[in-house]
């Protein structure tokens, strides 16, 4: 069983530095390092990876926070400083992906780079950053599931519960490996990105059903709704483009 953690890693000049921020920062930096070194595989200049990160990352963080705040508006309305305080948690990955990818696409059109090519390059690193960053939820004692007596349960507020952060962390690390292997021999632009959307949404739909802190839209869990839409739409597009590529390949034989 995992021990109950202290959310504060250390204090710097009187400012408590939280493990949540350290985990997210570590995930971003390691993911950036990997994408930077894999850039030549996509015939993209390494400096563009840094440029894109410097633009898409803050936009993605804003999107992740806005998404979370919107669906928890009763907790944040009227308190601007509470809205912008992300040190104690409150980032939704779907919001981050939506705005972060939108920013990336806009940059690609400005730079005249094929958007799907660079997104294919970056998306394995996104999965790895998620795998590492999810441990921030452990230190904050959040994003956990319903009670369970399974041997890998963790204790939250005196109760043994599903470590849903761990489920997602393990899945995203496996997904990172799969995406890198696929991306090294991808058949068409967008293949890696579509595979990420499909496989991540599959996991998130089921794990979200175990969580006790889901963002809600009426009686529906928002993450499950978004995951279902992304899963089926991305899967259909993936199958279509795969068949299209196969037909083109046969025409040249």
Image (cartoon, helix red, strand yellow):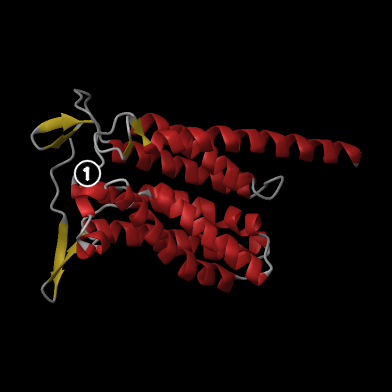
Q: Among all residues in the image, which is located at the extreme front?
A: 78
Residue 149 in the figure: left or right of residue 178: left
Q: Residue at x 32, y 29 (%)?
A: 219
Q: How many neighbours does mark 1 have within 10 angstroms: few (below 14), some (14-19), or many (20 or more)?
A: many
The quadrant in which residue 237 appears is top right
Image quadrant where one finds the N terminus: top left
Front-most of residues 93 and 132: 93
The residue that mark 1 highlights is: 142
The quadrant in which residue 18 appears is bottom left
Q: Position of residue 117 (x, y in %)?
A: 65, 57
Mark 1, secondary structure of its residue: loop
The quadrant in which residue 85 appears is bottom left
Q: Residue at x 43, y 34 (%)?
A: 225
Q: Position of residue 175 (x, y in %)?
A: 48, 41
Q: Position of residue 241 (x, y in %)?
A: 72, 39
**Could one spot residue 181 in this view of the protein?**
no
Residue 16 in the figure: left or right of residue 22: left
Against 156, residue 148 (above or below) is: above
Image quadrant where one finds the C terminus: top right
Q: How many numbered circles are shown?
A: 1
Q: Residue at x 64, y 48 (%)?
A: 190
Front-most of residues 194 and 229: 229
Q: Among all residues in the image, which is located at the extreme bottom?
A: 13
Front-most of residues 36 and 107: 107
Q: Residue at x 21, y 26 (%)?
A: 151
Residue 77 in the figure: left or right of residue 189: left
Against 33, residue 93 (above or below) is: above
Front-most of residues 54 and 169: 54
Q: Position of residue 138 (x, y in %)?
A: 23, 46
Q: Among all residues in the image, which is located at the extreme left?
A: 158
**Could one spot residue 132 in this view of the protein?**
yes
């Amino acid at each position: 069983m995992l021990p109950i953690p202290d959310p504060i890693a250390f204090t710097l000049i009187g400012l408590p530095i939280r493990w949540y921020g350290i985990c997210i920062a570590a995930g971003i930096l390691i993911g950036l390092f990997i994408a930077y070194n894999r850039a030549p595989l996509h015939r993209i200049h390494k400096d563009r990876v840094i440029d894109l990160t410097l633009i898409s990352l803050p936009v993605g963080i804003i999107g992740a926070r806005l998404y979370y705040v919107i669906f928890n508006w009763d907790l944040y309305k009227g308190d601007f400083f509470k809205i912008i305080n992300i040190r104690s948690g409150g980032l939704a990955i779907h919001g981050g992906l939506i705005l972060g990818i939108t920013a990336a696409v806009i940059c690609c059109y400005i730079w005249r780079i094929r958007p799907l090519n660079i997104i294919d390059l970056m998306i394995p690193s996104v999965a790895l950053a998620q795998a590492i960053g999810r441990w921030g939820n452990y230190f904050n004692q959040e994003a956990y599931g319903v009670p369970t007596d399974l041997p890998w349960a963790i204790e939250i507020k005196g109760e043994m519960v599903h470590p849903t952060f761990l489920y997602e962390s393990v899945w995203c690390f496996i997904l990172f490996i799969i995406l890198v292997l696929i991306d090294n021999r991808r058949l068409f632009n967008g293949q890696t990105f579509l595979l990420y959307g499909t496989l991540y949404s599959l996991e998130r739909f089921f794990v979200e059903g175990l969580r006790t802190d889901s963002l809600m839209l009426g009686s529906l869990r928002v993450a499950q709704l978004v995951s279902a839409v992304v899963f089926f739409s991305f899967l259909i597009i993936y199958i279509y483009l795969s068949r299209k590529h196969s037909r083109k390949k046969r025409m040249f034989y």
